[in-house]
Structure formats: C-alpha cells, structure tokens
Image: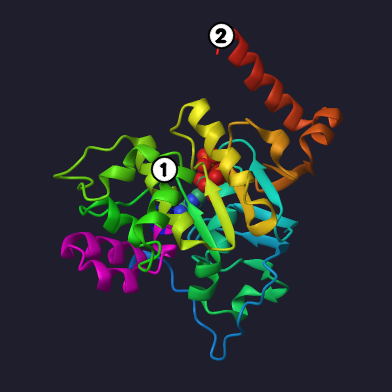
C-alpha cells in the first residue's frame, strides 16, 4: 500500500521537474526506486489522445493485487461525470484507494474496463492519464529544497503570484512569504497537515482536470478542512473532483456519494437520498455524528 500511495505523488511530471530542480540525487533516486518497484503497465503502441471530456467510467471492474487472491474490487461500475463532485466513502479496506490506484494506471484491472472520456485507458499513454488525473494522497513527498522548488514540481512555469494563489487555495497562505525557506531535513519542520496542504498546492498548480483527494485533508482540523473543501467546491464544473474519505463531513456539498464495502458498491446517491434510505451510509453518518456529540466537538 505504501509503495502505491507514495508514488501517487509521482503523477507529477517528475522528469521535467527534476531538470528544473536539479534535485538532490538521493531523493530523486528514492522516488525512482518507488516508481521502478511498481508493476509494469505497458504503453500501447499507438496511444490515443484524451479529449476534452473527462468523464470517468468504471465498467464491471474487478481487481486483485498481485499475489493476492482476494478481490480488492469486485464488479464495480460507476460514472464520475465531467465537472461533478463525488465522494467515495466506506469502511477501511473497502477498496477506495484501489480505485485511485487503478485510475493512475499503477495496475491494470483484472476484469472490466476503465474509461476516460469514453476511451479505454488501456489505449492511452499512462503518462497522459496521470497528467489528466491528479491525486493528493495521505502520503506526501517533499524534496529537501525550498518551498518554491517543491511547488514548481507541479508547474515549472508558474510565477510567484500563481504559487501564492495555490497556497491560499490549499489553506496555506501563511507560507506565501516563506517561498525561499527550505522544507524538510535541514529547513522548516513541517507538520503532517502542512505537508498535506503543500502537496495539495502543488497538485493545484499542476491543474489536472480530474483531481482525486485521497484522505487529503485527514490530518487537518475541521475548520481548515472545511475552508479547503469550500475552495475545492468553488472550482464549480471546471474540475471533476473525487474526494476519498472515511470522515463523513460536508457530504451535502457533493453531487454524489459512492459507498464502498468489501470491494462492492453498497449504495450511491446524494447525502439526502442516502440518509433517507437508512442503509450503511446513514448508519455510518449517525455513528460518526453521535460520536462527535458525545465528545463535545
Ligand atoms: P482505507 O480507508 O483504510 O485507506 P481503502 O478503502 O482505501 O481503505 P484499499 O487501500 O483500497 O482500501 O484496500 C482494499 C483491499 O486491498 C484491502 O483488503 C487491502 O488490504 C488490500 N490492499 C491494498 N493495497 C494492497 C497492496 N499493495 N497489496 C495487496 N493488497 C492490498
């Protein structure tokens, strides 16, 4: 899991970025070790080019991790419409992050097809897919370099104004005047939440039309999380947004919620539809909100 999650950061155009960055060898080597450790996903001989429609479709997708007989996903079908906002929720181990891993072409589905704008992603260059689908995960990778250089990995051409806007959207405006400070090892010691927000700012600079937030705000307090999610919602239909989370918070803002359980889609609908249904989602929501009341938060 760690290998896959760590390499989510690698959706960024790293080779190009490294030229600009002249990144320290050890860090670069570690990233490439991680990438190299991932199973080979072949590039088709004559890859098609993704079009302007970024609707994602999973069509009867099943998947088992290499060496495992258990199906992490079992006959999963859903559509993430272009420009809509979807939350993927469900208990731990339900298969939420596996959906993101398949979308990134870290693995091929064992059965079924995944489409981007109606094109089977097996017919696309994996790099094109990764450029269209940006992910911010729980695991972040920062180079022992300045904040600016870490952000420029997202878009080497970005100017300071753009860097500052991305920091602001990611809820890290306090870093706007710290662009030249070093992050990591010998520089600022960043908290988990700051690392996550820096990684989100980097993804926003990359500006992929599809953005997957995989527990990307998990280390943040609820006020900061709410502010960031409001910024993400303000993208309107400019971006297809997918938030993977097991914290059922602010769910009303999503167009649709997919509820996963044991590799299956147990339910899907809007927050109010799922609450009215009184099934797994409603039970999870009631439990979480009752706990919040109990703990007084
Ligand atoms: P969480 O909320 O805990 O992050 P999740 O819903 O995202 O869970 P996944 O990470 O997608 O769940 O995992 C689905 C299943 O696949 C689990 O049973 C998990 O143990 C298994 N799994 C995940 N990654 C790997 C891997 N790299 N190799 C083998 N099995 C894996």
The rendered magenta stretch, by its main secondary structure, is classed as: helix
Q: Point out residue 254 in the picture as x, y percentages from the top left corner.
A: 71, 42
Residue pictured at 69% horizontal, 62% vertical: 61
Residue pictured at 67% horizontal, 73% vertical: 52
Mark 2 sits on what residue? 296
Mark 1 sits on what residue? 197
The reply to whether the magenta stretch includes residue 25 is: yes
The mark that comes first in sequence, 1 or 2, is 1
Whether the residue under disc 2 has CB within 8 Å of ligand 1: no
10 Å crowding of disc 1: few (<14), some (14-19), many (20+): many
| Outermost residue to the front | 161
Q: From the viewer's perspective, is residue 187 above or below residue 295?
A: below
Residue 4 seen in the figure? no
The range drawn in magenta is 8-35
| Outermost residue to the left | 186
10 Å crowding of disc 2: few (<14), some (14-19), many (20+): few
Q: Nearer the viewer, mark 1 or mark 2?
A: 1
Q: Is residue 3 left or right of residue 131?
A: left
Residue pictured at 66% horizontal, 60% vertical: 62
Under tag 1, what secondary structure?
helix
Which is nearer the eye, 96 or 211?
Answer: 211
Residue 109: quarter of image: bottom right
Residue 79: quarter of image: bottom right
Q: Point out residue 99 in the picture as x, y percentages from the top left corner.
A: 60, 55
Residues at circles 1 and 2 in contact by the CB criterion of under 8 Å: no
The reply to whether the magenta stretch includes residue 64 is: no
Q: Point out residue 241 in the picture as x, y percentages from the top left corner.
A: 63, 52
Which is nearer the eye, 124 or 167?
Answer: 167
Whether the residue under disc 1 has CB within 8 Å of ligand 1: no
Give the number of callouts.
Answer: 2
Residue pictured at 45% horizontal, 39% vertical: 171
């Amino acid at each position: 899991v760690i290998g896959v999650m760590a390499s989510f950061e690698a959706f960024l155009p790293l080779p190009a970025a490294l030229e600009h960055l002249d990144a320290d060898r050890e860090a670069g080597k570690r990233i490439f070790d991680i990438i190299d450790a991932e199973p080979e996903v072949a590039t088709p001989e004559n890859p098609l080019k993704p079009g302007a429609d970024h609707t994602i479709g999973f069509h009867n997708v099943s998947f088992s991790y290499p060496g495992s007989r258990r199906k992490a996903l079992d006959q999963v079908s859903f559509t993430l419409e272009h420009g809509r906002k979807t939350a993927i929720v469900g208990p731990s181990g339900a298969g939420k992050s596996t959906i993101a891993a398949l979308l990134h072409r870290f693995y091929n589905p064992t059965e079924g097809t995944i489409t981007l704008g109606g094109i089977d992603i097996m017919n696309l260059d994996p790099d094109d897919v990764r450029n269209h689908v940006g992910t911010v995960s729980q695991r972040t990778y920062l180079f022992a370099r300045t904040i600016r250089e870490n952000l420029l990995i997202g878009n080497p051409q970005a100017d300071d104004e753009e860097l500052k806007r991305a920091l602001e959207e990611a809820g890290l405006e306090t870093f706007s005047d710290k662009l030249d400070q070093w992050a990591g090892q010998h520089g600022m010691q960043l908290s988990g939440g700051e690392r996550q927000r820096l990684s989100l700012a980097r993804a926003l600079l990359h500006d992929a039309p599809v953005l997957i937030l995989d527990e990307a705000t998990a280390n943040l307090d609820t006020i900061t999380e709410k502010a960031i999610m409001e910024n993400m919602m303000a993208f309107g239909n400019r971006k297809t947004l997918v938030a993977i989370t097991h914290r059922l918070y602010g769910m009303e803002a999503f167009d649709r919620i997919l509820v996963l359980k044991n590799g299956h889609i147990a339910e899907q609908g809007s927050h109010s539809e799922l609450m009215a249904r009184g099934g797994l989602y409603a039970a999870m929501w009631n439990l979480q909100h009752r706990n919040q009341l109990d703990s007084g938060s």
